[in-house]
Amino acid sequence: ALYCVKCGHDLSELFDTCPNCMRKNRVDVEFCAGCGANLYNHRRIQKHLVNATEALENHEFEAAIGQYEKVLGIDPQHSEAQERVKELREKVSRINQLRDEAYALMGKGEEEPALRCWQELLQLHPAHEEAKDQTERLKRKLAEKEIAQHMERADRLLEQCSFEKASAEYEKVLLLDDTCLLYTSPSPRDLST
């Protein structure tokens, strides 16, 4: 650290280290006094990299791409920015592809494959609100279908006086939806008549 010779105040915040030669330079200089490296551009690049990292933490992929592209505008050969832009563009493309595929499947009434698309999208983008909403909606819809199937089987079994099997189907309904109001268990007296 650097300190004032008169009062001892820490002056390190007024200096940057050159990434090329490691020389300390004042923060207000554009070029390193030791090797001539462009410190102004280095600071700008670091700022954009920090902004890109923050955008990624918030799952703002387009904003992160924008920050990495600003880095490339300053240094077109910046390998980290090149790799991240490529990776993020592929990720955004896959997210859009999964979204479109999910809606196409939903339009054809294919809920289970559509649900898998939304779930895969959420693995890529856990904060994607639309995918969260559609996943929950499809899960409810599929559960309702399964409940209806169990109810239908149970009703048929009751008509055949197969009470234990009917009861097992009704139990399955309650496991799927413990708030199910479609069915109330008949009393033992009702079953014996």
Image (cartoon, helix red, strand yellow):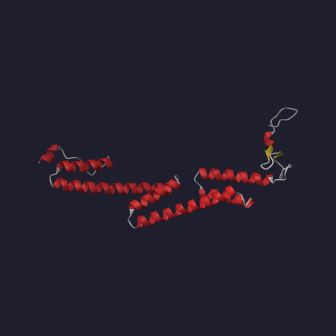
Query: How far across and down, in percent of the image, does residue 38 sit?
Result: 81, 54
x then y, percent, for residue 111 = 39, 61
Q: Is residue 128 visible?
A: no
Residue at 44 percent across and 56 percent down: it is 135
- Horizontally, residue 119 falls left or right of residue 174, namely right
Residue at figure coordinates x 42%, y 61% from the top left: 114
Q: Quick check: can you spot residue 53?
A: yes
Q: Position of residue 57 (x, y in %)?
A: 60, 50
Give the image quarter of residue 104.
bottom left
Taking the view exactly as shown, the residue that stands out farthest to the left is 193
Residue 185, above or below 156: above
Q: Nearer the viewer, residue 86 or 139?
A: 86
Q: Position of residue 180 (x, y in %)?
A: 30, 49
Q: Residue at x 46, y 60 (%)?
A: 117
Q: Nearer the viewer, residue 132 or 52?
A: 52
Seen in the image, is 77 located left or right of residue 58? right
Q: Quadrant of the N terminus?
A: top right
